[in-house]
Image: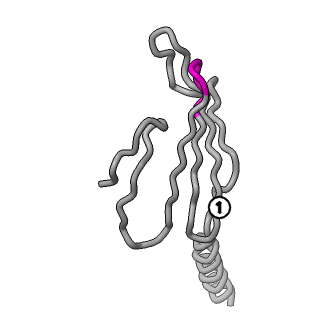
């Protein structure tokens, strides 16, 4: 009898882990670089930029707005992504200067 309960418990526990892992993760929020934990070093005479990500996730679409604050001012880039199994090419912004074609 104890073996049956043990086997049943193991099966239910394993099944619950499987269901738990299927939950979608939502990255919505504001993510800010912590310079005290960053490996970014000063580049020449300029300090590392302040970097902030504003992420908005709705269903299978993610919009990432990146804000760079440097001594020269503030620059923003925006990237839209679709989560799915189909592979797509996207244009990726590079520090707000120009767009790099996807590969």
Residue positioned most to the top: 45
Q: Which residues are magenta?
A: 68-73
Q: Please report the residue visible at 70 percent of the width from the left and 51 percent of the height from the top.
A: 29
The residue lying furthest to the left in this view is 103
The scheme the figure's colours follow is one colour
Q: Is residue 94 above or below residue 28?
A: above
> Residue 41 placed where, x, y %?
50, 18
Q: Position of residue 59 (x, y in %)?
A: 62, 71
Q: Position of residue 57 (x, y in %)?
A: 63, 61
The quarter of the picture where residue 25 lies is bottom right
Quadrant of the rendering where the C terminus is positioned: bottom left
Number of other residues with Cα within 10 Å of mark 1, as a class: few under 14, some 14 to 19, many 20 or more: few
Identify the residue at horizontal 60%, vertical 82% (top origin).
11
* Residue 98 within the magenta-colored segment of the rendering: no
Query: To which residue does mark 1 refer?
Result: 26
On screen, residue 32 above or below 82 = above
Q: Is residue 71 magenta?
A: yes
Residue 36, given in percent of the width and then of the height, sits at 64, 23
Q: Nearer the viewer, residue 48 or 34?
A: 48
Say left or right for 101 vs 44. left
Occupied quadrant, residue 3? bottom right
Q: Residue 85, relative to residue 41: is it above or below?
A: below
Q: Main secondary structure of the magenta part?
A: strand
Count the marks. Answer: 1
For mark 1, give the secondary structure.
loop
**Residue drawn where x is 44% and y is 35% of the image:** 97
């Amino acid at each position: 009898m104890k073996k049956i309960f043990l086997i049943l418990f193991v099966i239910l526990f394993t099944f619950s882990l499987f269901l738990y892992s299927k939950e979608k993760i939502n990255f919505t929020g504001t993510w800010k670089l912590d310079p005290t934990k960053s490996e970014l070093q000063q580049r020449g005479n300029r300090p590392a930029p302040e970097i902030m990500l504003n992420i908005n996730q709705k269903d299978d679409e993610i919009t990432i707005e990146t804000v760079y604050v440097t001594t020269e001012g503030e620059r923003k880039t925006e990237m839209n992504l679709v989560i799915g199994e189909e592979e797509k090419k996207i244009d990726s912004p590079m520090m707000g200067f120009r767009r790099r074609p996807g590969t």
